[in-house]
Amino acid sequence: MIEKVNPSHPDKVADRIAGALVDLAYKLDENPKIAVEVLIGHGKCHIIAETSVKLLLEDVNSCVKRIAGSTIETDYVEIAQDPHLALNQQGLIRCGDNGIFRGMPLTEEQKTLSLIARKLYYAYPYDGKYILDKEKLIICQSNAERQELNNTLEKESHRYDITINPLGFWTGGTNVDTGATNRKLGSDMGDAVTGGGLHGKDLSKADVSINIYAHLMAQSYGKPFELSVAIGDEKVNGLPYWLIVQVAKTYIQNIGGFEKFAEWGLF
């Protein structure tokens, strides 16, 4: 059983904005330290960024309007990173968080719903959420008529018992619902377990680098992969932390950056 939400769901809009600001930070500094929280809804986008690099307000506004719409008003608060946390990263790349992490192999059900979600989003790039529970497929897709969705899902209808928009036509988006960063981790991580959120943080944060590393190891080994880390760790799982950060950095670069990572998460 798994739920996926698409990149236009309000929570994912918040994740994408946070990811876009992290991308901006990496354009200004090779190894920035940044953590971004976003709350968006009903024409307003509230952002708090704890950062070692200064982001220009015009660049922040540009990201918000590009992702969430030209009428969104942005309230941006930028705060310097805590000096104790900054000290932890001086000289070496050390683990930036405490946490427990369990990467899990993706199931065929999870992979299947991920493909269905992408298929629907490419046809209907609007707020949507989808559930696959054995033979039951639930489709809640905004700005689409049932018959249109039935036609799009003709192939899937031969395999699944499909429920489409049980309340009828709906519009969705940030004018209907609020969104916040890291509120859809089940959609982004499947059965994996994490001590923190994936989005809006630089690669020194274990919430990003260790989650990605544990996920990749679980897929490679085909079984759960567990780690616990402490802030300041220079080695994790017998490896230098900088090497795990590099693995995560390569993963992020290969998918196109932190904003792209925020669209669908780990699968």
Image (tube, grey):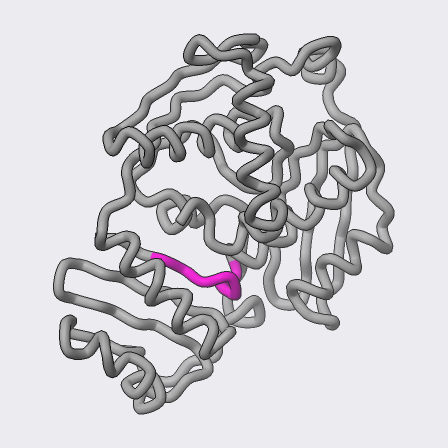
Residue 74 placement (x, y as % from top left): 75, 57
Residue at x 61% of width, y 42% of height: 253
Residue at x 38% of width, y 85% of height: 169
Residue 191 placement (x, y as % from top left): 29, 40
Magenta residues, as a range? 4-10
Up/down of 10 relative to 220, above or below? below
Describe residue 155's horizontal placement relative to residue 93 as left or right.
left
> Farthest residue toward the bottom?
147
Residue 6 on the magenta segment: yes
Describe residue 208's horizontal placement relative to residue 152 as left or right.
right
Up/down of 49 relative to 16, above or below? above
Residue 121 on the magenta segment: no
Residue 203 placement (x, y as % from top left): 61, 30
Up/down of 151 relative to 74, above or below? below
Residue 104 placement (x, y as % from top left): 29, 35
**Residue closer to the observer: 231 or 210:** 210
Describe residue 155's horizontal placement relative to residue 174 as left or right.
left
**Residue closer to the observer: 29 or 69:** 29
Asked where in the image residue 72 lies, by quadrant, the reply is bottom right
Asked where in the image residue 139 lies, by quadrant, the reply is bottom left
Up/down of 122 relative to 30, above or below? below
Residue at x 40% of width, y 49% of height: 267
Residue at x 31% of width, y 91% of height: 147
**Residue closer to the observer: 265 or 216:** 216
